[in-house]
Image: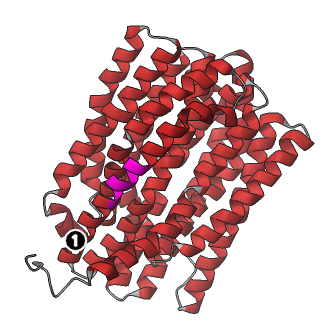
Amino acid sequence: MPPSPYPAELPSVAARRREILRLALPAFGALIAEPLFLLADAAIVGHLGVAELAGVGLASAVLHTVVGLMVFLAYSTTPAVARAIGNGQLPRALAAGRDGVWLALLIGIVLAAAGFVAAEPLLDLMGARGEVRAFAVDYLRWSMPGLVAMLLIFAGTGVLRGLQDTRTPLLVASAGFTLNVLLNLFLVYGLHWSVAGSAIGTSIAQWAMALVYVVMVQRNARNHGVSLLPDWRGIRALSKVGSWLMLRTLSLRIAILATVVVVTAQGTVNLAAHQLAMTVFTFLAFALDALAIAAQALIGKELGGSRPGAARELTGTMVRWGLGFGVLTGILLAAAAPWAGLLFTSDAEVQSALTLALWVLAAGQPLAGYVFVLDGVLIGAGDVKYLAIAGVVNLAVYLPLLLAVRQSGAEGGAGLLWLWAAFSLGYMAARALTLGLRARTDRWMVLGAH
């Protein structure tokens, strides 16, 4: 084997793998907390009825569009903190984290108030009607208090990831998930609060988690002589990075919302099945994204310390692992697909449609593993402008595929199958191409070193 071109910069292969696993394994547990919240909500609400499940599906699409756009609070904070750590500047790292928490609080308050007022018109735009609309409005409005907490969780998690700590978020997420399930069961079935009980229980659990992060960030800042007051220059810097990340995320959310609009026209059964399939997709996406979180933290740290060779080697290792993990999850999902619907609903039509969607989703898992890892690498490097532009290009490729599905008039299981083929295979292939082409260059490493 020829010698590495970066021998002075690189640890041993075994040490590099241990470092990836040290961050990725706890990150896996923490990342799947939010989709586990959704899976628990879907399982609890699903047994109330198809209308309740469809209503939660529509409301969740709106809610997670807003939350998804704000994920920059974690994704901009993690590399900023990690690069400062790579340079040996702990106070600077903690100051960046503090500013991220303040930014999350301010944005969260504004969005929660706006979301409560705009719940009905937003859901009308999504095509909600009748009983489904009523359940969707209830779920969305009662989720608004938890929105503020969710953004604080993003910022706090980003701080700890940048500090190379993914174990604490795992502990917080595990406790939060347990509390969420217990509260939802009690409020939905004990007090008979229906979908509103599910939203309220989740909001309470999210606030408990958020308070843990706020206390930790405050304590670390105080112990190292960092002021707890916000630095508006730091907030503006995070906002600038966040604006590109928001555009990147906006393209993703438009793709998901457009998919919901198309499936809504296919009927209540397909909408309910799609909600369940999207919940499974989210669960697997976060699981695969564990490597992307490790990439954000490690790539930011290596480039902050001017070690591009180490960053390149880490990228190669994590891409191979992402592909392998995607193959594994795809095989497991394909095997479980015929029985997965039994966990969420007793409706035979929904179960049948869900099985077809899950088989397509399983086929796209290797692509997803590749995409999520490279996405994390480029975020860690701060290559956010490219990610934003690439996101718009990917959306331009996907929307005609989605339009073709709608114009085909396919309904029932066939309609859902083609819809998921366009999303899980077509859209993901476009993302894989744009990210892969960028990763082959050195431009992203130059950006990350500054």
Would residue 149 be found to the left or right of residue 295 on screen?
right
| Residue at horizontal 44 percent and vertical 35 percent from the top | 361
The image's colour scheme reads secondary structure
Percent of width and height locating residue 144? 68, 45
Amino acid type of the residue tagged 1 in the rendering: Glu
Residue 346 higher or lower than 327, as above or below: above
Percent of width and height locating residue 414? 46, 15
Residue 411 higher or lower than 351, as above or below: above
Residue 92 or 359: which is nearer the viewer?
A: 359
Q: Name the element at disc 1.
A: helix
- Furthest-front residue in view? 335
> On the image, which quarter does residue 8 sit in?
bottom left
> Would you say residue 79 is visible in this rendering?
yes
| Residue at horizontal 40 percent and vertical 46 percent from the top | 249
Percent of width and height locating residue 320? 28, 59
| Residue at horizontal 20 percent and vertical 67 percent from the top | 445
Would residue 56 be found to the left or right of residue 294 on screen?
right
Would residue 340 be found to the left or right of residue 143 on screen?
left
Residue at numbered disc 1? 313
Residue 231 higher or lower than 433, as above or below: below
> Would you say residue 141 is visible in this rendering?
no
Q: Quadrant of the C terminus?
A: bottom left
Q: Which residues are magenta?
A: 321-328
Predominant secondary structure in magenta? helix
Residue 436 higher or lower than 140, as above or below: below
